[in-house]
Image (cartoon, helix red, strand yellow):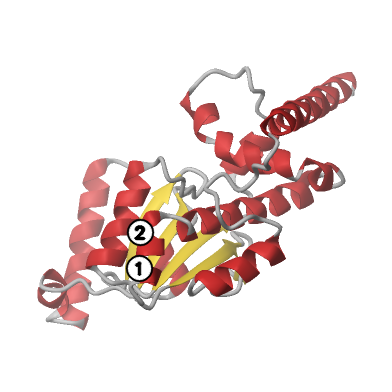
Amino acid sequence: MPITRVLQNNKEWARKMKLEKPDYFSNLAHQQAPEYLWIGCSDSRVPANQILGLAPGEVFVQRNIGNLATHKDLNCMTCLEYAVMVLKVKHVIVCGHYNCGAVRGALTMSGKTPGLTNLWISDIKETRNKHAEALGKLEGDAQMNRLTELNAIRQVFNVCSSPVVQSAWGQGQTLSVHGLAYSVGDGLLKELTQPITGYNSLAKAAEASDFPSDSEAVWEDRDLQKNITDSFKANMFFEQREQAKAQTNGKH
C-alpha cells in the first residue's frame, strides 16, 4: 500500500470521526488521563486499544519485540515511570501473545546466530532455560504457548520489582499489575496472574508462579556456577533438538 493511500485513509477516518463526534479531537488534544499502561509485543496483530475495547487516550502503550520489561531497558522503564508517576495509571498490563515470533526464536534460534534480535530475546531464552525440563516435555504449539505465558509472567515480576512500582506501593499509591496472554486466533485474553497490588500479593504470586519476587532475573538461584551450567545445558538441549528435527525433515 503506497503512503498516499495511507494518508487518504487518515483523511477519511478524521472526517468520519468529526461527523460522529464533533468535539472528539478538541477534547483529545487537551487531556490524557489513561487508567491503563499496556506493555505488549510490537506484533502488528496485537493492537492494545482494540483488544481492550478502549478509545485513544484511555490506554498508555509501550511495545517491543517479545513484550519485555527488563530493568536495563531505559525505554520501557521511562515509559513505566511516566505512566505511574505522572499519569497515575491504576493498572499496568503485561501482555504476551500466542504464536509470537520472539518466543519461537527463543526456542529455535541458535546461540551462534548473529544479530541484535538474538541478543534481545536472550531474556526469553533465560526463562526457557529455567523451565527447560517442563518445556522439554512439550512439542510444537503447546511448547510455544507455555513459554509465551512464562515469559509474560517473568516480565510481570520485572515490573513489580522495578524501583518505580516499588516506590509507588511504598507511598500507598493504588496500582495493580496484571499478566495476560492474547490469542491471535480468537481475540481473547487469558489471565495469567491474579492482580498484584502490593508487597503481600507480590509474594503470593511469586510463590504460585515459581518465580522469586526479589530479583529482576527471576530465573537465578543462589549458586551462580550451577545456574551457568544449567543454562548451557538447556541451550544445548534445544539447539540439538532443532538440529535433529531439521535432519529428519531433510530426509523426507
- Name the residue at the front extreme: 222
Position in image of residue 73 (x %, y %): 39, 41
Residue 251 appears in which quarter of the rendering? Answer: top right
- The percent position of residue 224, horizontal first and vertical second, equals 67, 32
Which residue has dot 2 on it? 164
Which disc, if any, is residue 79? none
Q: Is residue 219 left or right of residue 91?
A: right
Asked if the residue at tag 1 contacts the one at tag 2, i.e. Cβ–Cβ closer than 8 Å, the answer is yes
Determine whether the residue tagged by mark 2 lies in a helix, strand or loop.
Answer: helix
Residue at horizontal 22 percent and vertical 58 percent from the top = 10
* Up/down of 124 relative to 55, above or below: above
Residue designated by label 1? 168
Disc 2 residue type (three-letter): Val
Q: Is residue 40 left or right of residue 172?
A: right
Q: Position of residue 51 (x, y in %)?
A: 47, 68
The answer to whether residue 160 is visible is yes
Any part of residue 186 in sight:
no
Residues under labels 2 and 1: Cα distance?
6 Å
